[in-house]
Image (spheres, helix red, strand yellow):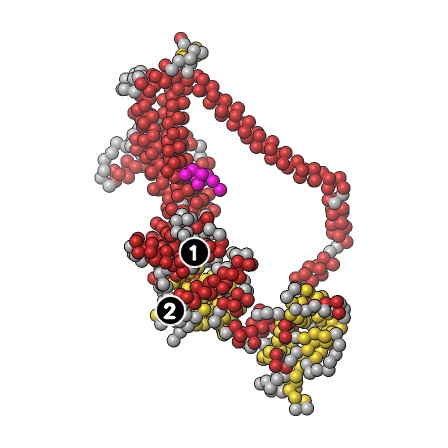
């Protein structure tokens, strides 16, 4: 007997009360005022969307663009006595950070700003390359696996985000420190080291462990979108699995690679906590320098100029990258 | 020895048996279709021939060589996928040249051979375009060119026309067939479209829930279906079962639906249970009785005017449904729902087979009523 008949028979067995309740509810839901209210809500939907989008744009305008405009203006003003801002247009700040050796907190080593900017870009580059090398395989695996544990594994990738950043860096101090895990283990195999803390290695490895998910997730996303048919058709045409990867999967996952690289690069270059906690004085990055200039030297105009130069450099780098890879491809679709 | 031999092949995915003990062959240069409804295991069978899926049991031979355990990239197979699987990051020329590149053919020769094969599929001057810029039909040709350029042993196609609209599909049918003949390549073609399979194939293998129901020329499949499934899947037909009786020197089939048929000089003993398949387009319909043999009354439930043919959905006295189809029918006004009509069939057109089983025919009746 068909399922339909079975269901009809079931409903005949319903108690009188259930039938009454059913009729009551349909009656209520189909009543004129209820229907009209639903209709009105539906019509408002577009209005709601507009309001939501407008809120987002307004938020950006008030809290991002406006301060940015203020910083831009500040960068052309001057620091007066006792840290007050003198609203007097001049290029002196830019001149000093780009062309002059700056004296800051006792450093007198050439153009500190440019040195530190260069160091930040170098750290950003090292972090990006390392996360790419470490992140591609997990991203690829997550994108291709049919395992029912895939969502669990994805959860594990983002799990570290639940731990506050500062705790993760402190944990890294325990790993890299004088008495830390790495030193201890190296000691067992006979390699003596005084720990890696307050070095370049500590800053970059710290950044890598924190930023790895930002590389894994975009790669996972773009690998998952590659249709099996592409890889399979490559195989039927004579490509070994390795060749098929090189010819098909890798180029098709390029959008994920560039999205991940851009994200990690921007976050790494702008990082503040990693150099502050894991690096020594020689491992400072732009964010630390700007923060010191703002907070300790009270030279807001100079700090603003530093911020603007930093933004321009980063923006230029990304635009050049865009030329080579095509950002539309990365963020499109 | 056939060129492609699929022998007792079974494929299980966990608890699901997708393909169950399937055996069929394709001769050198032959066009064989795998035909069957959705989920019957066509794609799985094709993928096993390609080496993209390993059979749980059974063997596959190509050109006499056992390839069962060889991976796809070591079989010489050209495959056209349902959505073509043209690489979006490579130009048309690079796509078509891909199999040659994998075989170490130098770039200059590659370009030459790609141009030649594109010419042969009638798609010149697209070498440097991106496949995404091409129309569906053109992509189809590129996919074919890519599957043929390295002169593989076998061409496999999985519903390659299903992504095209109807008119283009029918044009491409002819075109695929022309290309297949011209390259003279053994082809195994998967489709769920009976017309497509019949129009293109030398032989058709009909699959039913993972089993091979029948393999034969389209004519044989249509005129002498060996199972009820084949009779019902290929075209429209009505199945009536009954008992064979000899009366007045004639061999009669007294069906359970109450209609008696005079059988042609058919096999089967008296008291045997037999089944007749009534092809919709072989049935005649008339408002009056003519007293001919194999004539029986029915009541019209609905008429369906389709232009080139008209379908009459009728019921017999016991409620069994019956489909009659008439070609180029114009006298529609003479037939209304509820009218009693007389349906006839030439004894020669009766497809008679052993009754597949009492239980099965009962469920079939239930389904058609529900
Ligand atoms: N990888 C797989 N894992 C589990 N089950 C599968 C797999 N591939 C196919 N099946 C099952 O095997 C059966 C046959 O599938 P197959 O794709 O071969 O059918 P088909 O005849 O090609 O159908 P369609 O016309 O819909 O493409 C189906 O029941 C399907 O669910
Ligand atoms: Mg299929």
Neighbour class for label 1 at 10 Å: few (<14), some, many (≥20)?
some
Mark 2 vs mark 1: tell me if same chain.
Answer: yes
- The chain ID associated with circle 1 is B
Q: Along the line of sight, which residue is nearer the eye, A111 or B306?
A: B306
- The chain ID associated with circle 2 is B
Q: Is residue B43 magenta?
A: no
The residue stretch that appears in magenta: A326-333
Residue B109 disc label: none
Question: Residue A302: which quarter of the image?
Answer: top left
Q: At 36% from the left edge and 50% from the top edge, which residue is drawn?
A: A247
Q: Which residue is mark 2?
A: B62
Q: At 71% from the left edge and 61% from the top edge, which residue is drawn?
A: A9
Residue B123 disc label: 1
Q: Secondary structure at mark 1?
A: loop
| In this view, the mark in front (2 or 1) | 1
Q: Secondary structure at mark 2?
A: strand
Q: At 60% from the left edge and 33% from the top edge, which residue is drawn?
A: A50
Question: Residue B318: which quarter of the image?
Answer: bottom right
The answer to whether the beta carbon of the residue marked 1 is less than 8 Å from any atom of ligand 2 is no
Q: Is residue A196 left or right of residue B121?
A: left
Locate residue B340, reporting x and y percent: 76, 73
Q: Is residue B168 left or right of residue B325?
A: left
The answer to whether the beta carbon of the residue marked 2 is less than 8 Å from any atom of ligand 1 is no
Locate residue B43, reporting x and y percent: 47, 62
Q: Is residue A328 magenta?
A: yes
Question: Residue A7: which quarter of the image?
Answer: bottom right
Q: Is residue B133 above or below residue A283?
A: below
Q: Main secondary structure of the magenta part?
A: helix
Locate residue A51, reporting x and y percent: 60, 31
Q: Is residue B21 above or below residue A10?
A: below
């Amino acid at each position: 007997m068909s399922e339909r008949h079975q269901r009809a028979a079931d409903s005949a067995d319903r108690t009188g009360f259930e039938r009454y309740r059913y009729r009551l509810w349909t009656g209520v839901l189909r009543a004129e005022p209820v229907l009209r209210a639903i209709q009105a809500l539906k019509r408002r939907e577009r209005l709601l969307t507009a309001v939501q989008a407008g809120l987002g744009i307004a938020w950006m305008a008030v809290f991002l663009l406006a301060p940015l405009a203020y910083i831009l203006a500040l960068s052309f003003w001057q620091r007066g006595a006792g840290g007050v801002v003198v609203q007097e247009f001049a290029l002196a700040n830019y001149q000093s950070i780009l062309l002059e050796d700056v004296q800051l907190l006792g450093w007198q080593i050439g153009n500190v700003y440019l040195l530190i900017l260069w160091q930040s870009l170098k750290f950003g580059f090292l972090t990006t390359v390392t996360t790419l090398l470490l992140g591609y395989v997990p991203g690829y695996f997550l994108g291709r696996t049919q395992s029912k544990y895939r969502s669990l594994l994805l959860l594990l990738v983002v799990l570290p985000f639940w731990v506050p950043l500062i705790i993760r860096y402190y944990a890294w101090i325990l790993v890299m420190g004088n008495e830390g895990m790495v030193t201890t283990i190296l000691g067992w195999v006979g390699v003596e080291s005084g720990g890696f803390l307050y070095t370049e290695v500590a800053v970059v490895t710290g950044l890598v462990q924190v930023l790895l998910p930002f590389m894994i997730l975009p790669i996972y996303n773009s690998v998952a979108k590659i249709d099996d048919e592409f890889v399979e058709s490559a195989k039927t045409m004579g490509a070994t699995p390795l060749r098929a990867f090189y010819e098909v999967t890798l180029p098709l996952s390029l959008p994920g690679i560039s999205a991940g690289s851009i994200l990690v690069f921007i976050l790494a270059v702008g990082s503040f906590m990693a150099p502050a906690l894991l690096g020594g004085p020689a491992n400072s990055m732009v964010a630390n320098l700007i923060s010191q200039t703002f907070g300790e030297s009270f030279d807001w105009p100079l700090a603003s100029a530093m911020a603007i130069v930093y933004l321009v450099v980063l923006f230029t780098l990304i635009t050049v990258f865009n030329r080579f890879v095509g950002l539309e491809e990365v963020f499109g679709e | 020895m056939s060129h492609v031999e699929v022998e007792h092949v079974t494929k299980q995915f966990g608890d699901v048996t997708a393909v169950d003990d399937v055996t069929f062959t394709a001769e050198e240069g032959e066009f064989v279709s795998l035909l069957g409804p959705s989920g019957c295991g066509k794609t799985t069978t094709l993928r096993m021939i390609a080496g993209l899926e390993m059979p749980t049991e059974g063997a596959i031979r190509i050109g006499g060589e056992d390839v069962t355990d060889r991976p796809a990239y070591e079989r010489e197979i050209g495959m056209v996928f349902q959505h073509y699987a043209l690489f979006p990051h490579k130009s048309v020329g690079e796509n078509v040249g891909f199999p040659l590149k994998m075989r170490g053919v130098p770039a200059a020769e590659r370009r030459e051979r790609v141009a030649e094969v594109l010419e042969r599929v009638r798609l010149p001057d697209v070498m440097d375009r991106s496949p995404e810029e091409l129309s569906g039909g053109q992509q189809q040709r590129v996919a074919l060119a890519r599957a043929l350029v390295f002169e593989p042993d076998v061409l496999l196609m999985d519903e390659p026309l299903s992504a095209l609209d109807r008119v283009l599909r029918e044009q491409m049918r002819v075109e695929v067939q022309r290309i297949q003949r011209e390259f003279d390549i053994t082809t195994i073609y998967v489709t769920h479209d009976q017309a497509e399979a019949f129009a293109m194939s030398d032989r058709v293998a009909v699959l039913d829930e993972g089993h091979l129901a029948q393999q034969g020329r389209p004519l044989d499949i249509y005129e002498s279906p060996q199972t009820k499934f084949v009779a019902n899947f290929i075209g429209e037909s009505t199945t009536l079962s009954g008992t064979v009786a000899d009366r007045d020197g004639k061999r009669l089939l007294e069906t359970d639906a109450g209609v008696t048929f005079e059988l042609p000089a058919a096999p089967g003993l008296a008291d045997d249970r037999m089944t007749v398949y009534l092809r919709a387009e072989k049935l005649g319909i008339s408002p009056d009785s003519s007293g001919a043999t194999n004539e029986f009354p029915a009541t019209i439930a609905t008429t369906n005017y389709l232009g080139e043919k008209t379908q009459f959905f009728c019921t017999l006295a016991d409620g069994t449904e019956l489909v009659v189809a008439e070609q180029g029918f114009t006298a529609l006004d003479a037939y209304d729902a509820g009218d009693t009509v007389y349906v006839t069939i030439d004894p020669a057109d009766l497809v008679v087979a052993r009754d597949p089983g009492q239980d099965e025919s009962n469920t079939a009746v239930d389904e058609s009523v529900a």
